[in-house]
Image (tube, rainbow, N blue to C red):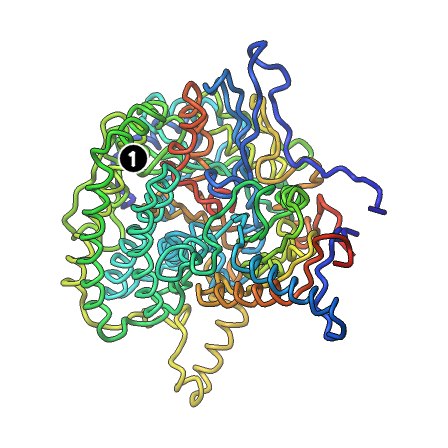
Amino acid sequence: MSASMPIFDTLQERLAPTAGSGLVSHGILVFALPPDALLPTVRQLRDEHGFDVFLDVTAVDWIEQVPRFEVVYHFYSTAHKVRVRLKTRVAEADPGVDSLTPLYGSAAFMERECHDMYGIRFRGNADLRPILLYEGFVGHPLRKDYPKQQEQPLVPYRS
Amino acid sequence: MYARTVPIVPASREKDGAFEYLTTRKDELIGWARKFSIFPYPFVTACCAMEFMAVSASPYDTDRFGAALPRFSPRQADLLMVVGTVTHKQAPILLKVYEQMCEPKWVMAFGVCATSGGFYQNYAALPGIDKVIPVDIYIPGCPPRPEMVIDGIMQLQDKIAGSRHLIVNDKI
Amino acid sequence: MDAPFRPIANPVRSIYEQTLREDSVVVNIGPSHPATHGTVQIIAELDGERVLRSDIHCGYLHRGFEKECEDHTWHNLIPYVDRLNYVSALINDFAYCAAVEELMGVQITPRCRYLRTLLSEYSRLVDHITCLAAGLMELGAMTAFLYLVMIRDYMYEHLAALTGARVTYTYGRIGGLARDLPAGWLARMEEILVQYEEFVARVHALVDRNRIFIDRMRNVGVISTAEALSYGYTGVILRSTGVPRDLRKDTPYLAYAELDFDVPVGIKGDNYDRYFVRMREMDESVYMMRQLAQMLPEGPINVDDRRCSFPEKHLVYTEIESLINHFKLVMDGPAVPAGEAYVAHESPNGELGFYLVSTGGGTPYKVHCRAPSFVHMGGVHLMLNGGQLADIVPTFGSINMIGGECDR
């Protein structure tokens, strides 16, 4: 996986208007884009460039930076056998991005997990119930200001 | 908070009188029968399930203890084997299954996660199932070797054999 | 009872407020259920025995892996990584170590590379054996379960001779492995593989052309290629639909580029195809292990890089530099430069990826595991809807959902 893969050059050229310039980091082409450019860029990746597998969505909590959350997406193309990473930044006050559920079926569960853990709201995903946590859990545990050992037991402890 | 309705009472040491002789013999007989016909309910969650599968199959067989046939309905089981980590999300289910079991029942905490939470000391894992249900035998290990599990089952069998089995009323 | 009655809390909310038909029944399956492999709850709406729609709830084994990782050094979290896909623990170790090595820019030694490949294939063998044994047992084929678990037990004891543990090994290290092979290990491996082939031949004879097995598994739990790709399926499930995608061939890592192996694919994407793809993949793994046992070069196991490799014990006790190196590695952890990396390996379930974010220093800023089981859970309803209630059991077994990986 070297930086001079022709598909990376094509992508950098074609996605420059919506996504800005990308750079290759550890074998993956990474784009940092504003939240509004996310859905059109992903649509372009899927339809024109054959990125048919949506691998992962997660977030990183940069607690001392503004905007606070960085939502990270990974895509894989079974035809070109390469990966692409998209990163956007959202603020703490309104941590919302567009949901990818219209484009990929796997987005449903993965966005629920990201919402559970970080509180990122995915506009367009109708079902953001807790998936790894439970009904009644207050807070988002993977945020840096959630103490690791703060338990919220559902069953009161005996004696 | 939660108390057993029929407590397991260890056998007392006094053996004077013909009546006590008969009840002791009754306890021994019922203890022998109960310890060799354990119906486990495998409440399986995590990695310890691999060792549970290994201990139920050859070469470590639980069938030679009479404890091979799992009963997947709590109404029909008497040993609740909690195998693996119990999280806070799973704890209500554990309590519900325990309460549905009929007396006499025993609980085995299989693995360190069930015993004390293991090395998951965080917001998600229950720090030991004895926070919600009473436990009779703890088997540490991550996961425990099958020999340890068999040792645990044998110690539980000793406990069952040596306890008083009150079958008629709360004295006999 | 003296204590006042307090109802037990319900951890999930069902979305089936309104049933599709007047006479359909909403049934709860799990999460303490033998066939849902411990910790998955399926709330299914049934019309008689037919599943109209199903709602999968996982998360009952969420143990806070990612939060724990932020508190431990890069080395100390290898045991946590082990317990993700606990049936093939070595592959998790090696995928995580490869991600850290990518971030640090560390090249592992040739012997380590071949040995990691051999042990990855060994783990793949153990995983497929466990999946098939559990799946067949749930269909009622106890004999196949007993044969497969017996051979798996030999493999566990064999791996315990190498790593010290039967199930969760904690054997991978950043820059290498914990220890080298003991004497006679490869000879014993060949004995086990010969016995494995005999046992698996018996399972093939019992199950492959069994009328009942074919009736229960053929055309059950079907998923099409387009749906599989859209729902993020990789690994055996994608290959069972006919797509020959395998990270070991497409983006070779470790020593896979030098090995000769095939990638088996299915035709219809049903349960029978998944069963057969797993059986064939086990044969391919055995073939690869035999090739690797011949190819294994001599040399050191750990790379000679004091940023991540522990110094020899006798040096730690005699030289002050080694002592300080050891101390810093244990107390602060290896200093990984700031940056992020995503490295994926082909686990028996599919693409297992680790996304690491480092801000320099010995503890990670974020560790995220892209778990194939979790992504697969998102599309299980496609395989269950329209089928019978009794088909949920073999379909769920053929997906090989591992709770530790799904819920992390």
Quickly name the residue at label 1: C274
Q: Is residue C183 left or right of residue B75?
A: left
Figure quadrant of residue B170: bottom right
- The percent coordinates of residue B6 (x first, y second) are 74, 53
Say which of C138 and C327 sits in front. Answer: C138
Q: Mark 1, chain letter?
A: C
Where residue C355 sits in the image (x, y, percent)? 45, 47
Please tell me in which quadrant of the rendered image residue B61 appears: bottom left
Q: Is residue A146 left or right of residue A72?
A: right
Q: Residue at x 57, y 29 (%)?
A: C28
Looking at the rendered structure, the kind of residue marked 1 is Arg
Q: Residue at x 57, y 57 (%)?
A: B34
In this orientation, does residue B9 appear? yes
Q: Where residue C189 appears, x then y in whole percent?
A: 22, 63
Q: How many numbered discs sit on the rendered protein?
A: 1
Q: Residue shown at 38%/32% (left/top)?
A: C395
- Residue, x 70% and y 60% (percent of image)? B8
As drawn, which residue projects farthest toward the bottom? C318
Q: Nearer the viewer, residue A29 or B81?
A: B81
